[in-house]
Image: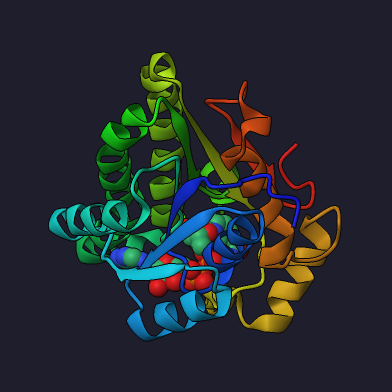
Amino acid sequence: MTERLKDKRIIVIGAATGIGRAVAAAASSEGARVVIADLAEKQGQATAGEIGHGCAFIRCDVSDEQSVASLFAAALDHLGGLDGVVSNAGLQKAGPMVDMSVTDWDGLMAVNARGVFLATRAAVPHLKAAGGGSIVNTASLAAKRGGPGVTAYAASKGAVMAFTTACALELASDNIRVNSVCPGFIDTPFNNPAIEFLGGREAQAKLVKSWVPLGRQATPEEIAPLYTFLLSDESSYVTAQAYSVDGGVYN
Ligand SMILES: NC(=O)c1ccc[n+]([C@@H]2O[C@H](COP(=O)([O-])OP(=O)(O)OC[C@H]3O[C@@H](n4cnc5c(N)ncnc54)[C@H](O)[C@@H]3O)[C@@H](O)[C@H]2O)c1
């Protein structure tokens, strides 16, 4: 443990599994006090227990205003203040754009875009009270490059990227830094709908090999260190950025 986040009070939303879980575990191992939030209650409780070091789980639906307000009230009670927030909850639905229902479009926007807005809005007064802080939002390579079958998802992540930049400019004078991370292919169950749309695992593996310069997917643990950096004081002069972690796809 190098303690790059020693005593920082951090909420990671969408952390029951995958990238968020790895980010929360990395933050905790760097000395942060961590609250994780997710819709998936059983898995979230289990993850908090595995992370240990006082990590607490709070159930939250990021698309719901009241649920996000309750999360921040309970998390602030637990942490006693706030230094960083990671908005990482996400939903994906894949399929041809012409077949997409308004319900599916709105559902993606509610979690991926509205969720980031609600969490950011709830976090800012507490970060201001702490004299500043760091907000990290998970966007996606899809926001920069798009792709067949993921039109609504790409649009929702484009919203996250644009919202992040605008918030960074609005909040800079409060010493609140706001950045996004744009993962490429990370090996989590999240991609199952897109894999199905592409024709299965073998077809996806072929695509990854031909499309990704490093020729493979990443593990969640390979992407977590960037979040640690952005949450730490090492990135004190970094804001309004959208970092690609995609094996070289976006260049
Ligand atoms: N895996 C990839 O290749 C990839 C690529 C680009 C971006 N991303 C983004 O990374 C983030 C994490 O994805 P992951 O790959 O770790 O997948 P994941 O499915 O393991 O993680 C997503 C988490 O969000 C939670 N969640 C979903 N809806 C929620 C809601 N309404 N309220 C609270 N929590 C909710 C899920 O329960 C889950 O724990 C997502 O925002 C995703 O869009 C993933």
Say which quadrant the C terminus sits in.
top right
Q: Which one is in front, 221 or 200? A: 221
Q: Is residue 239 left or right of residue 106?
A: right
Q: Is residue 39 left or right of residue 48?
A: left
Residue 173, given in percent of the width and then of the height, sits at 40, 13
Say which quadrant the N terminus sits in.
bottom right
Residue 175, given in percent of the width and then of the height, sits at 45, 21
| Farthest-out residue, right | 214
Residue at the image point whose x is 65% and y is 61% from the top = 29
Residue at the image point whose x is 53% and y is 40% from the top = 180
Residue 122, given in percent of the width and then of the height, sits at 25, 42
Residue 129, given in percent of the width and then of the height, sits at 31, 29
Residue at the image point whose x is 18% and y is 58% from the top = 70
Residue 100 visible in image? no
| Vertical comparison of 27 with 128: above or below | below
The quadrant where residue 224 appears: bottom right
The quadrant where residue 208 appears: bottom right
| Vertical comparison of 117 with 16: above or below | above
